[in-house]
Image (cartoon, rainbow, N blue to C red):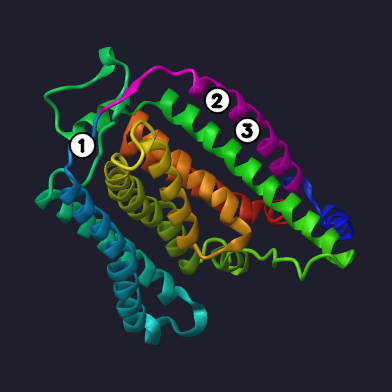
Amino acid sequence: MPSELAQSLDAFGPWDWACIGLSLTTAIAGLYALKCWHNLPGTDAEPTANATEATAAFFAAIGAFLLIFPVVTQLVSSRFAGLFGLSQTHLFIGACAGQLSAAAAILAIGKFLPRSLHWAPSLMPAEEQLTGLSEFRQAVRAWSFPRWALSFLAIFALGVLGTILWKLFCLSWQQLYLAGWVGSPPADELQDIVQVVMRTELGSIKFIIITLAVAIGAPIMEELVFRGMLYPSLKRLCQPLSPGRSRLLAAILTGMVFSAAHLCASAAIPLFAFGAFMCLIRDRYGLLTCISIHASFNLWNLVWLKLAPNASNL
């Protein structure tokens, strides 16, 4: 591991060092943001949905992600395969279509089951609570640049901390393996999408479609599914099991499901931290803030993967 790190540092260019410096600066600012976050006031509102509605919302969210998204992705990919061949462009066109279809399904379910999809904040000081407005309009009113910035910095710091924990875990396992105490260490492999982005030419049609899928389609779909519908339903269902701690338990469970859904062991810890903390952001600032943070975070990583591939994949 140390020799691999040395080889990576030897290959660094100016953009790689810029990436490291900016990421560390942002992460340090994020630690301060986490401290500010901890001290923010607010009392979580009681869930409005009953157990039956929460159960229906839970299965609707799972169905949209596990059925509608992959099925539409496969159907559209097959349709465009003959046009784009082995370039994989058709796969990302399919992914965009699948993401939008799953998002549309969640919105439709939220229309027919009004208490299944939650846009508005549920954890705000009494003087800031917005009454007489629809949930969506409350989410719009709750969004602001300072709130976005505070939340983005906090989520970025957690992502960096999660990545460091994973690297330390892999390093420790490798040392124990070399000492003969444990079996082979887990593979520290990049996510498939990361590898594809690094191989894709900037400015190509394929890269544009990847950007749409990563920075627009995925944030909208995943936030609607995980933070808009799955997390509130889990919070309601966990209430009888853990009175007073249903919010924390639901956030942990949502983070675990969110991490597992990405099928990448090397990113499991930062994805869990991301998925769990985004639930707290939804409670405090609403779903639109979550979508904007998710989109910004994905776009940040996409840009640095192209500008500084060595530093982005340490």
| Residue positioned 40% across, 56% down in the render | 218
Above or below for 206 versus 284:
below
Instruction: Using the rendered view, name the quadrant where residue 42 is placed.
Output: top left
Instruction: Using the rendered view, name the quadrant where residue 171 is placed.
Output: bottom right
Disc nearer the start of the sequence (3/2): 3
Label 1 sits on residue: 136
Q: Position of residue 139 (x, y in %)?
A: 26, 32
Kind of element beneath mark 1 = helix
Q: Main secondary structure of the magenta part?
A: helix
Residue type, numbered disc 2: Ala
Label 2 sits on residue: 33
Instruction: Using the rendered view, name the quadrant where residue 62 is placed.
Output: bottom left
| Mark 1 neighbour density, 10 Å: few (under 14) some (14–19) many (20 or more) | some
Which range of residues does the magenta coloring cover?
16-45
For the residues marked 2 and 1, what is the alpha-carbon distance in whole angstroms?
Answer: 26 Å
Q: Position of residue 259 (x, y in %)?
A: 49, 56
Residue 289 in sight here: no
Kind of element beneath mark 2 = helix
